[in-house]
Amino acid sequence: MTRVTILGSINVDTILQIPRLPKPGETLSMSGKQVAGGGKGANQAIAAARAEADTAFIGKVGDDANGKMMLKALQNAKIDTTQISTSNYADTGEAFILLDDNGQNSILVDGGTNQEIKIGDIETAHETIENADFLITQFETPLTTTLAAFRYAKSVGVTTILNPAPAKTDLDPELLKLTDLIVPNETESETLTGIKVTDEASMNAAATALIKQGVKAVIITVGAKGTYYQTKANHGFVKAFKVDAVDTTAAGDTFIGALSSRLNSDLSNLPAAVLFANKASSLTVQKLGAQPSIPHLSEILADGEIKKA
């Protein structure tokens, strides 16, 4: 069983269903409201665990009802929460998601306790990191903490996966040199490289630019079109599964969690793992909400399009 440790954000999502985004000064009526677990880190951890990876989490919640709810949700998903600490100084992170009738979303985030994860928390979690095949993180927690975590992971031979979301331009160059696999979407890829992703040639150019900055392999997700992957040795494109999207909120997080559950630590089976992750994402977008929509392994394998490894 693949062992995955995720350093990341824990949020409670409030999903506001609206026909379309309001114009400046306009008032719209909502057609629905839902409160559910979220946060890119927590979503990715639940996706990995539901795909039957042995999953642990490094993070922080507040001493509030939302924090207790999220701890219970992660534990119910069979995630090791030993390295999730409780802060007395901030509330658990929250996100407010505007979801339109086409399934597209705009998201506002209050980082809360996610911004309180310190280097000391990484030092406390050294054994958890060392026991993993993969360490995954995103940009919803402090970059100094991410850098410390990746430094330690590489020192003990753990493969690092970076989801550069939300995209940032002020990265420490060392972070990319410590990254084995980077997984941006097309917008994040453009932010990191300055290259607009429009076709496979531009994906290749963007991925090459990232590899030149020190990462060993690149995956660029392009939504309903599919996924481009590139290593120093090969590259390719894996088409998405065609479905009718209801809510795209956790599609990228599901992809990364599911990917890690099937990926070899030397990335040697990258195309097969991408296909598996594409399938998982295609199931996620057909349901409402982040964590409630993330599929279990049995659902991913149900129609026979993906074979069990």
Image (tube, rainbow, N blue to C red):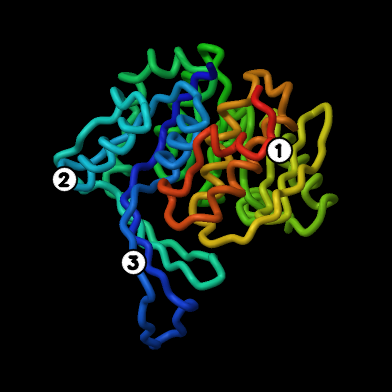
| Mark pair 2, 1: CA separation | 43 Å
Q: Position of residue 293 (x, y in %)?
A: 46, 49
The three-letter code of the residue at mark 2 reads Asp
Along the viewing direction, whichever of 202 and 268 lies nearer the viewer: 268
For mark 2, does the 10 Å Cα neighbourhood hold few (<14), some (14 to 19), or many (20 or more) residues? some
The three-letter code of the residue at mark 3 reads Lys
Residue at 77% x, 36% y: name it: 230
1 or 3: tag closer to the N-terminus: 3
In this figure, which residue is indicated by the disc labeled 3? Answer: 33
Q: Specify the quadrant that holds the C terminus.
A: top right
Q: Which mark is residue 305?
A: 1
Q: Position of residue 49 (x, y in %)?
A: 46, 30
Along the viewing direction, whichever of 192 and 2 lies nearer the viewer: 2
2 or 1: tag closer to the N-terminus: 2
Residue at 65% x, 54% y: name it: 223
Q: Position of residue 27 (x, y in %)?
A: 36, 86
Q: Quadrant of residue 234?
A: top right
Does the rendering let one see residue 142?
A: no
Describe the element under mark 1 as helix, strand or loop.
loop
